[in-house]
Image (tube, rainbow, N blue to C red):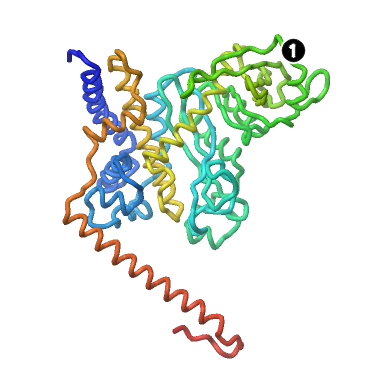
Amino acid sequence: MIVTTIKDQVAAEAAIAERAWTDVIGAAMAAVADCFTRREPRLLAGEMCEAMLMELDTRNCWTLAEALGHCGPHRLQHFLARARVDHDLARDRLAAWITSELADDQAVLVVDETGDEKSCTDAVGAAHQYSGALGGVGLCQVAVHLTYASRRGHAMIDRELYLTAAWAADEERRLLTHVPDEREFATKPQLSAGMLERASTLGIHARWMAADEVYGGRELRLAARRLGFDYTVAVKTDHRVATSAGTFTAAELAGQVPKNAWARMRTGHGLKGDRHYDWALIDVPADDTPTGHAAGHSHLVIRRHRYTGELSFYRCYCATLVALATLVEVICCRWKIEEDFQLGKSACGLDQGQTTCWNSWMRWSLISMLAAAVLAVTRLRTTAHATRGRLVPVSARELLRLLRATVLPRPRRDLDHLLHWSAWRRQHQRRAAAAHRLWNNITADATTWPHREDQEPQLP
């Protein structure tokens, strides 16, 4: 195709994206095909993946079913809760497929958590706990995610739902939400270590692991070393480091850095231009060398804001000596998972699943990750074959706009269908309201029941 104008260039990219999408969604579903015992749930998973990327106000079983043209949400609800699907195997197959598409020998596995606000404690794992996404303590589910980030792209490849100690010990809530018996309380670093070990077992090739200060303790760093990953993890200001001159906090070591030891480096590009910080590196002894492993090279990297002087600290390890610029690049790669969270929540329904049970949460998050992964690989293939010209490479959000206009199915909006769903919703809501009123009456009457041992209360 001869490109003569910018509009022609965008049209050419849209045609490339359309072909790439068809190939990619087919390859992704083929990778997980044997995780479904029947053809129906496999086809429904593909439909649900595409529906996640439709232009919808909200994404749940009701809205997705309506957009797909179903007469009710029952098929999707059955798929999430009861269909015979090995979602753990599908997670592993999806991770292997994503990493093969985005493969890079310097790839980074990024660990972080995100919270989804809830209105009640009926949902599995929902509790009053801290979430950075909420900006404090709130009623929410918290999940730890793992992103594979390379020069070719990035996408989430794994997740684990965090259960607080009180939640994990509550047998009644575990039974009601069908939490597996083998799932016990685990800290967020322990969940992260489990995902790293799973990635290593699957043969996923990545050199680095990056995380924020929640995961900067010795436990996860030791696990990363044992599994063969170099790492850059943020640590707190009061993190103590043993040196040949004694033990100091990270802040105390920063005060000993000479003025001429700071290096100013570009760490990214924002709306207001390039972002630059001052960086310094201090060699420190390793405190997390597993038995039988070589010592390698351990550093404390310090970042200083150019204007405010605010300091951030990172504990780093590499088996072979690398430059400070390489460590800075890996440290900044941690923000890729934040981009994945934003895309997953805004375009793939990551935080919108109104699920209460274990299987439902696992399968909803799996479909959301599948949709985001297909989008990431489609973007890779589109940018690899598109002509740059006078345009920047297409972003994931811009690509999604093109796909919605070309290849993605449009939500069903004919009048008969809308009338059917309006009637269905209102009838369902009437029955739900009547059930709530009946329950409230029963619980109110229970307070007046006699409590003599020889007289049983009678339900109305």
Horizontal relation, residue 415 to residue 154: left or right: left
Please determine whether, in this image, residue 389 is positioned above or below residue 139: above
Residue 297 in percent (x, y) is at 66, 16
Quarter of the view holding residue 315: top right
Q: Could you tell me which residue is drawn at 35 percent across and 20 percent down? A: 393
Q: Residues within 10 Å of mark 1 (few under 14, many from 20)?
A: few
Please determine whether, in this image, residue 417 is positioned above or below residue 309: below
Quarter of the view holding residue 436: bottom left
Q: SS at mark 1?
A: loop
Q: Could you tell me which residue is drawn at 56 percent across and 51 percent down? A: 138
7 and 353: which is toward the camera:
7
Q: Residue furthest top?
A: 260
Q: Which residue is mark 1?
A: 258
Q: Could you tell me which residue is drawn at 78 percent across and 20 percent down? A: 243
Q: Quadrant of the C terminus?
A: bottom left
Please determine whether, in this image, residue 188 is positioned above or below residue 76: above
Residue 433 in percent (x, y) is at 38, 69
Residue 77 in percent (x, y) is at 34, 55
